[in-house]
Amino acid sequence: MNFNLASKLPHVGTTIFTKMTMLANVHQALNLSQGFPDFEADPRLVKLVTEAMLKGYNQYAPMIGAQSLRDAIVKKYDQIYNVEVDATEELTITSGGTQAIFTAIATVIRPQDEVIIFEPAYDCYAPTIELFGGKVVPVRLLAPDFQIDWDYVATLMNSKTRLIIINNPNNPTGKVLGKEELIKLGALLEGTNILLLSDEVYEHIVFDGAAPQSVLEIPTLRERSFVVASFGKLLHTTGWKIGYCIAPPKLTHEFRKVHQFNVFSVNTPMQYAIAEYLADISYVKSLSDFFERKRNLLKEGLKGSRFTILPCEGTYFLNINYSGISNEKEFEFACSLTTQHKIATIPLSAFYKEVTNQQVLRVCFAKRDETLSKAIAILNQI
């Protein structure tokens, strides 16, 4: 049959993550492109999932999430941020961070609404905005510091601006917005009807003595914000796809209207297992040191290479500039690294709406030390 189907996302193809991982698999290359660990989660956590299943937690969880997991999250925000969250009125368990982001955007964006995003940006933001008829208004940030000019952001805000999206710590840049910058954003939004979506999935992976930051700590932001986080990054279990969204009761009420007809509820035994695992909050506090050591291993190992290392304040991604090696555009250079040198990375240009070539690649260091040592050896030979 010849269907006359007009695509709702005509400019969207296969994601860069899938492309580079497929290329890595074909050429048996070391895969530092897609952001997932190559080491296992804590065996105790896996055992807790089995125990939850044996206890009979195998049917639908409550639509808003298992009570024990919501209570564990509330405890975390109290101990880490000194912030009170209402487990019933403000917190919803979701099928990963991306589903929470999709649902939040679906909840508030209508045709012709404008959404300000900061590029390079995680690749689900723009297509989801466009899917619901919104207009993406990108603020292009450039290497090496990816600094935000808030005065310029103010010039983009108008009566059509419905939402601003931030990602803190930022994937792919590794930049962290400190409390002062969040306060600036709060002052900028005060007196407006603009909402905020704060993607905080890497919240606990910050380096060099920095403390985790959340917009929930800023009253002028909390009252208008969807805060999204994920257990995939927290527990090294990206395949479990369990996250959550915190928002004021009025926003949560609308969020759940969409959520219940999207996934309805989330994997039950894993929710109970995570709740029990997070009874010891010290695990959360150990993540920064764990990943900072891996960042430093990669940074130190590449000091003698021809790559220039960009600052990395958080997340588990390091950006490297190859302008001293090649004039190729980022995607072509990333492909040649994969096919010729057997190492896969992500071109930073993939995170911009318009063509932007800064000769920078994103490297994932959420890998075993042996994997990072192999990567260092390869990159030092280029």
Image (cartoon, helix red, strand yellow):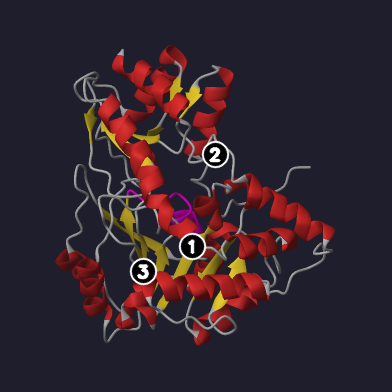
Going from the N terminus, do you reach mark 3 or mark 2 first? 2
Magenta-drawn segment:
120-130
From the viewer's perspective, is 140 left or right of 103?
A: left
Residue under numbered circle 3: 214
**Tag 1's secondary structure?**
strand
- Residue type, numbered disc 2: Thr
Residue 360 appearing in the image: no
Q: Is residue 21 left or right of residue 80?
A: right
Give the structural element (helix, strand or loop) at label 3. loop
Q: Is residue 121 magenta?
A: yes
Please name which of the two marks, 3 or 2, marks the residue nearer to the observer.
Answer: 3
Query: What is the quadrant of residue 317 in the picture?
Result: top left
Height in image: 319 above or below 199? above
Identify the residue at image location x=57%, y=28%: 22
Q: Give the numbered dot on residue 14.
A: 2
Dot 2 alpha-carbon crowd within 10 angstroms: few under 14, some 14 to 19, many 20 or more = few
